[in-house]
Each structure stands twice: as C-alpha cells, then as structure tokens.
Amino acid sequence: MDQVVGGLRQQVERKLLVRLIIPIAIITFVNSIDRVNVSYAGSAMSADLALSPDQFGLGVSMFFFAYLLFQYPHVRLLRAWGIKRWIFVSMVLWGLSGLWMSRVESAAEFYAARFLLGMAEAGFAPGMTWLISRWAPPSMRAGALAAALVAVPLSMVLGGPLCGWLLGIANPLGWEPWRYMFLLIALPNLVLAVVAALYMVDSPDKARWLSPVERDWLAREFVAQEGAADSPAIPIRQLARDPWLWRCCLTWLLVMTGSYALVFWLPQLVRQLNLGSSELMIGTLSALPLAALAVGLMVNGRRSDKKGERLRHTGFPAAAAGLAMMAAAFLQPGWPVLALLCVAGLGIGAAQGVFWAIPGTVRLGGDRVSVGAIALISMFGTAGGIIGPWLTGALVESSGNFALAIALLASLLVLALPMIAIAPGERAKVRPAAQF
C-alpha cells in the first residue's frame, strides 16, 4: 500500500512540475527579462532621446513605484476575475508597455511606459505564489516555489546575451537597434497572454490533466496538512494583528534589500579582476554567483520539504550570505572575493527559495494561505528594490567608500536570522514529506 501511495505522490509531483511549474517558470523568465532589458538599451536610448542620467534613473525607478502601488489592487482583481482573465489582462499590458517602449520619443513617455509595465506586472509574483500554494500541499511547497523562482536568476544569466543578440541582429524595419529589441521582446508576451489564459486554471479540481485519483489524492493531502478547504478567510484587520505577518514582511524586506549588495557589487568586482577585454569571460564570471543562487533555490527548497522545516532553512542561509559579503567587502578585489560572492549567491537563493513556504506554514489568513497576506509581504520586498539602490548611492556619495555600503546592505541579511527563526512556536511546524 505504501508503495502505491508513494508512486502516486511521485506521479503527481511530476505532473505538477511539467504541467504547472515549468509553464509558470517560463512566464517568470519573460517577466524578469521585461524588467532588465532597459539596462541594456540604456546607453543608446539615452543618447537618442537626450536623457540625462537622472532622467534615465527616474524612468527605471518608475517601474518599482508602480509595482509597489498596484500590488494590492491586483489581488482584488485576481479574486474577482480568477486566474484566466487576470493573467490575460496583465500579460497583454506587459506586451503593450514593451510596444510603447519601442516608440517612446521623450522622457515623459519613457516614465509612462515604465510605470505601465510596473502596474501590469505588480501582481504577478504574489499571484503565482498564491496559485502554487493552491496546487502544492505544504510538504512539497518549498520545492515547487523554488523550481518556479529559479527562472529569475536564469533570466539574469541569459538576459544579457539575449538582449545583446537582439541588439545586433538584422533590423528590417530600419529602427534604432534598441527600439527593435523592445519590439521583439514585447511580441511574445502577447502570444503568451493568450496561451496562459487558455491553459491556466485556478485549482486542481479544474485540471483535465490530473486523473480523478490524482485529484482526490491532492485534496486529501491538503485536508490532512492544512484542514478543510472551506475554512473562512481571516479579515484583513484581524490578520494585521498577527505577529507572524509582520515578521514575514520585515524578513522579506531584509532579504530583498540585502540581496541588492550582490546585484550592485558583482559587475564592478568582475571588471576589477584584471581579465583584459574579454567580455565573454567577464560575462561568464558574473554569472557564477547567479548560478549559485539558482542552485541554492533548488537544493534548499527540496531539503526544506524533506525536513519539514521552514524558518531555519530561511534564516541561516540569509545570515551566511550576509556574513560572506561582509567579509568580502573589506578584501582586495580578486578570486577569493568572487568565491565569497558565490557563497553569498548560494545563501540568498536558499533563503528566497524557502521563504514563500512560510506564510502557508504559519497559516496567515486561515488554513489556506491568504493572497492578501502574500501581496502585503511582497510589497515590503518591492520596497527593498527602492531602498537598496537609494541607500547604496547615498552611502557611496557621502563616504566615497563602496565597501561600507555593501557591508551595511549585507548586514540586513544577517538580521533576517533573528527576525524569522527565533522562538518559532508551534505554528511554524509543517509535516515533512512522507518517505517511501
């Protein structure tokens, strides 16, 4: 009997990976490319549009302001519309913002197009986290979330070569290369919007690719691990009184703000390794910490599912990443520093891969994870995208010391350990995955 149940579990896990997680990862990859492609177009676009550095920086930041502002409205729309209509409208707006970016003629249009992109993408991360939580029981949730999130570091590794290739290919329209790049990246979004709307469903009971036996097994696992599916949602006012909500919010703020130390320092470090003019070598070495981040996501997510523990699997890797970067900040640029940044990437990925299993584990919003809670926590992480760059620039300008800014941001990762992993209490326990 145990062998039959174990085989059924593996069968469901494989189907969830192929039919749900990989499609979400593909959309996540496209989502991430949309955010960073402006950095590769920045120099030529600024010259063509006569943008000052301040204007370009403000345009980039407009994405984050809109992203922060519209996350909760996305939650309301997702609840009202369901996954199909919501993801279709969101992705069409992504595509339209890319088309607009290909035709902008002024700083004001640049600001507006980036704001539209942030508005369109604001709900994607919390929406997909919530969707996965409706499909993956707690005992397999960290691994499922990590498998979807691995698309983010992969987009960083592959995004540069992809955008560079698009900037250099033949341009039959006679446009500036950066305009043609935005156009070619925007068009697949419109196609994916239709495909995603036709393919995605809200919950396992609506999935034709699961057999009745598999749907029944998933339903039983959810009841066994979380309780009845029809448990009433906790009102937002009551949810705000839950200390776990604010512990999760502050932890995600610390992790995301601290991770910008790696993002900002990495390109500068690699160029200081005295490797000559080999852009291929520079790109390859820059990808190593990001590859380590992807490894951390996958390995720690699976380990956390196996052990049935979330808090220490988030706090300790985050602290290790912070300590590695703090040590590296005061060393002379060289190979030991790059090795420490790989350790930091591993720790950041490990923490991020498990973190989003915590809200469901501690039952924020009731027996089933609350999309409102996910959105609020995600907003704190988005705020890190504003605080991290601003804080780094302010410290470098005031002290002239880049290492000090990196060390301060890295210290925030260390603070994530006591914030999330001290005195966890009974609510933080999750039943480990069954072993057969």
Image (spheres, rainbow, N blue to C red):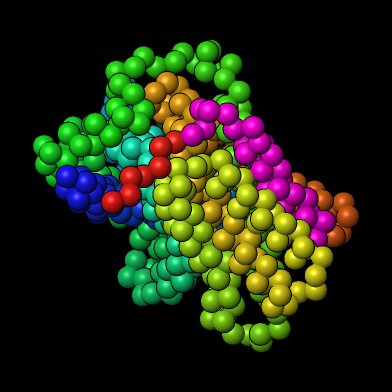
Q: Residue at x 36, y 14 (%)?
A: 232
In front of the other: 56 or 104 = 56
Residue at 59% in and 85% down:
278
Tell me the chief SS of the magenta region. Answer: helix
Counting from the top left corner in percent of width and height, residue 48 is at 56, 61
Query: Where residue 149 appears, x then y in whole percent?
Result: 43, 51
Q: Which residues are magenta?
A: 402-429
Q: Please tell me whether residue 110 belongs to the stretch shown in magenta.
A: no
Q: Is residue 41 above or below residue 310?
A: below
- Give the percent coordinates (x, y) of residue 68: 55, 34
- In the rendered image, the quadrant that contains the N terminus is top left
**As drawn, is 334 to the left or to the right of 278?**
right
In terms of depth relative to the viewer, which is nearer, 300 or 70? 300
Task: Kindly give the residue lying farthest to the front in the view shown.
Answer: 1
Which residue sits furthest right? Answer: 399
* Residue 400 picture quarter: bottom right
Q: Which quadrant would residue 276 be assigned to in this image?
A: bottom right
In the foreground, 63 or 269? 269
Q: Tell me if I can see residue 8 in this picture.
A: no
Identify which residue is drawn at 82% across, 65% down.
Answer: 330
Residue drawn at x 24%, y 40% as measured from the top left: 200
